[in-house]
Amino acid sequence: MPNPKICVSLEETTVKAMVDEAARAGIQGADMVEVRFDRLYLKKPQATISEDEDGNRVSTMPPVNEWPVMDFDQVNIDESIAALKEAIALPVIFSVRSVREGGHFAGDEKQRLGILQAGIDSNVKWIDLEMSIKAKDRKSLVEAAKAANCQIIASQHDMSGTPSSEEIISMVSSNADNGDIVKFCTTVKDHQDALQIVDAANTLSAQDSTPPYSLMALGNGGDWARLHAPTLGQELVYATMRDEFRLSDKGLVNVRDLQDAWRLLEY
């Protein structure tokens, strides 16, 4: 079987910087990128420069959840989508992550759904539709996506804790009709939590009628399901362009390091 597709989730906060990040992701081997439109509402602060005990300059940033957030009307939605579409060559997964699922969107739910519809109207290749969207609203977006030949990521982001592997398996299986790929992301507190993700993926890979899936986690051990994705039946793996020290503690994997690991492990 071919290795899973690699999607780099773009983390910049302006259209220009996001376009540049997408170009670098393509050079480093990404198959597609995720445009996190909600991140365009963030104001990236200046880094704080200090010296460590050895006299070396150290640059630090506050946690992203402490960054200022712009008002809804401060982002020109149509112009931003048009500029991103024109400049990004790779296939795009378009998402507007809600605060309840770990995102940064500044407006209300009606405004967020409007941006998702605008993404579909732009003929984006993929749209990320959370399964927490109200049934009537989600049905309308799904119908619009299918009419536009836009494939759907049916996603769930549970930041409160990791469910059991049985619960994850049930969630994936029961949402087979809600998207072309079922995505689940959680936050792990320890390695036992991380094993729930691996066990769920391993079990799903042995089943005959499993929908395509992408399982992952944030936190120490959350990168296991990404690193071993080729043996776990994963359809899609999310990576990052970040390359800071101890990135694995966050459960993230740099796109280049991910490919190196697959080659080293002979996947």
Image (spheres, rainbow, N blue to C red):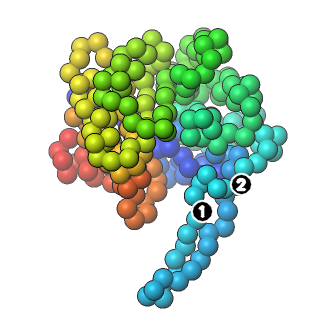
- Residue 39 place in picture, x, y as percent: 64, 45
- Residue 261 place in picture, x, y as percent: 26, 50
Look at the picture and state if 218 lies above or below 245. above
> Which of the two residues, 210 or 10, is positioned nearer the viewer here?
210
- Horizontal side of 101 relative to 231 (left or right) equals right
Identity, as a three-letter code, of the amino acid under mark 1? Pro
Tag 1 residue: 62
Look at the picture and state if 201 lies above or below 102. above
The quadrant holding residue 45 is bottom right
Q: Secondary structure at mark 1?
A: loop
Give residue 68's mark: 2
- In primary-sequence order, the first of circles 1 and 2 is 1
Look at the picture and state if 105 lies above or below 109. below
Mark 1 Cα-neighbour bin, 10 Å: few <14, some 14–19, many ≥20: few
Name, please, the residue furthest toward the left. 266
Give the residue at x 46% y 53%.
241
> Which of the two residues, 30 or 59, is positioned nearer the viewer here?
59
